[in-house]
Image (tube, rainbow, N blue to C red):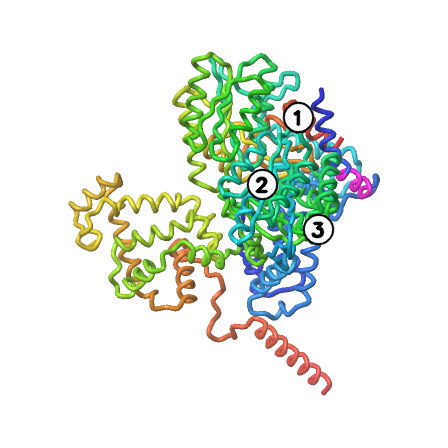
Amino acid sequence: MFESISNRLRGAFSFLGGKLTEANIRDGMQQVRKALLEADVNYEVVNSFVTTVTEQAVGEAVLKSVRPSEQIIGIVNDELINLMGPVDHSFHFQKDGLTILMMCGLQGSGKTTTCGKLARMLKDQGKKPMLVAADLQRPAAVDQLKVIGDQISVPVHAEEPGKSTPLAVCQNGIKEAKRRGDINVIILDTAGRLHVDDELMQELEQIDNKCQPHQVYLVCDAMTGQDAVNSAKAFNDAMELDGVILTKLDGDTRGGAALSVKYVTGVPIKFIGMGEQLDKLEPFHPDRMAGRILGMGDIVSLVEKAQMHLDEKEMADAQAKMAAGKFTLKDFQKSMKQIRKLGPMGEVMKMIPGMGGMVDAMQGFGDPDKDMSHIDGIINSMTPWERDHPDKIDRSRRNRIARGSGSAPNEITNLLKQFEAMSGMMAKMSNMGFLERMRAVQEISKGGMAIPGLDTPTQKMRSARGPADPIAAREALKKKRKAERDNKKKNRRR
Amino acid sequence: MAFFEKLKAGLAKTKQLLQTDIRDLLKAGEILDEPKLTEFEKRLLRTDMGVAAADAIMDELRAKHLGRTVVLDDIWQTVKDKLKSLLRGDGNSNWDSENPLSPLKLSSTKPSVILVAGVNGAGKTTSIAKLAKLLISTGNSVVLAAGDTFRAAAVEQLTLWSQRLGCDIVTKPSGTDPASVAFVGCEQALSTGKDVVIVDTAGRLQTSQNLMQELTKIHRVIGKKIPGAPHESLLVLDATTGQNGLSQARNFSDATQCTGLILAKLDGTAKGGVAVAIRQQMGIPVKYVGVGEGIDDLQVFSPDNFVDALFA
């Protein structure tokens, strides 16, 4: 659905033959603007952002750079990072005694779940957190927090919803924590409220005044659209926020709200929620977020994820086998299993720079995850001996495997062919460095998509005669013409 | 009808935003040129309707008004007409403010099944309670199936609502396959002769394939128990959602063949303009709007009122 902004920019500039003028830059910026709007960045923010970047781009040496579109993307990216940073992932605990954290936000932004995630994170850091269920509004919200508290073994202070007020619950919670003595962080879970509801906003201010929380966090749904600025501003005006926690970023939202909220309130984004499980709270990184908003991939997160989930020994084994040319179907199956641990293929591919666009292009080609299960099934239908000797699979074996895995015989043939081609390539690739390998992968992905014979070169091939640099060529042409003109003038005078 | 007032109140802020600036901007008698149109585009984009829908309206405005003298009322009319026609679509939807059940296609044989899905925190459970209230107050008997067996205390939340409403509820312990809850819900409605089953589901992000497949399974299992069911498959959409709403509508529709939207939380400053884009690109109509936290704050959607309240 979303065309990656970098692709768009390349498209916008490529037919200009690399020649950049101020007008062209503005044209390209229109693409940036559209992409940002589609990423749900607030309209005002988009406009002022585009203005700043245009000024920078026009002023800078972009005009003379070799790959102007790349450089403009660079400027856009840097500016995004600039706007969303700097980050501060610390909680600023009180030296001694109780640190009070308060959570607020709209209904359904994920406050209660985030409270649980925060408590878990603090517990892992060696703190002694306690949760206070001050959401008396939503039915069973108190129960929800109790269940979460049980799951992570953190005490929860709760009162009967009908017989108390949110303020009283918070005050009693703090008293209780002080009485217990073994608690050093307390997290207040307030009810979700609309920022236009004066009564409830006052209630929140009251809690803020009476309980004096050391840190107030706004929990914000990353899928929020243009309205994100209104609510963030209202909450910030009411209470002076110390940080924002962006939730539901595990979906496919571009998360433009992150930019809007930071821009309007100036409050740093601290953490992001990446899933429903209570360990899915991650520190916020503006560079990764910028890549996400621009659709440019997030190789750092991918590598981190890989380090977390992949079995290093197995990967090293596979690699050694590849290098030796002894990579069998069995190893292939193992590696596939490893890669699938990283999540759905579409998500993984989006994280690789330059592959984001591929995912959309592949929509019509079926689901890569399904294909992988299918291949898994085919390999499972082979005998161990066949997995080690794929070249020994003859027609009768092939038909048996097809029957066993519920696929057509030609699918087996295709798989074997692909595997053969791949293992040859892998042997080659395993001798390359990391960057070279990345490039090779991107080459393959490009090659795979192109229709043979209809290959459109990204950059026009230059003849051997002319210089490769278009600007130098233009300058040379200018000089030549000027010399001709001067000559003519001289001749006339004579 | 209270609908109009409530919606109007909810959208009041939008209206001010839309009107004041444009009134200042476009003085009657001037020529409408591109820069002035861009300002107009800004107001449209601010409603979250997205670039595509805004472009459709802008094209219409260009064709009809560009280069001519500004007659403000005419421009309003063009915008409204275009928006209304976008929202009405091909006219296969029915919104009758006098009959709160008019948007629903209920089965002639008991029971009808309504499947409700949506992302986390969109307002599914609350919307289900409101919908159940609407059905009960029009003389239908309702069974709720608490299919959110994942989130802590979600079943308790729906149980509390069922007690307040005085309707039946089917629950199973946390962690049970939600499809089995839906199945038992249908079974119970069949055996006790209830009119409508409303199946709640756990909130899920549209990108998690396994959970979307689980939703497809629920849909399938319901269809097995009661042929032709679910008769309505509603997606609850948070009005504050931006362009991600499109992705939500697309993926949920793939999984459960959505027949309509419930636009929740329309009482804030958000306008839910993405509903226009969803209608335009996927043809899924808005059926109800949630305009408050009270149990009665679910109203039949009306394109006319929605648009009029926006530009009144």
Q: Which residue is mark 1?
A: B294
Secondary structure type for disc 1: loop
Asked whether residue A219 appears in the rendered view, the answer is no
* Residue B1 against residue B63 in the figure, above or below: above
- Identify the residue at horizontal 59%, vertical 57% (top origin): A286
Q: Quadrant of residue B127?
A: top right
Task: Determine the CA span between mark 3 and mark 1.
Answer: 31 Å
Closest to the observer: A380 or A178?
A178
Crowd around label 2: few <14 · some 14–19 · many ≥20 (10 Å)? many
Query: Which of the image's four quarters has the C terminus of chain B?
Result: top right
- Check residue A110 in the rendering and tell me which mark sits there, or answer none: 2
Residue marked by disc 3: A265
Image x and y of residue A417, in percent: 26, 53
Q: Look at the picture and state if A217 lies above or below A191.
A: below
User: Residue A82: x percent and y percent?
Assistant: 64, 60
Which amino acid type is shown beneath numbered disc 1? Gly
Residue A12 covered by magenta stretch: no
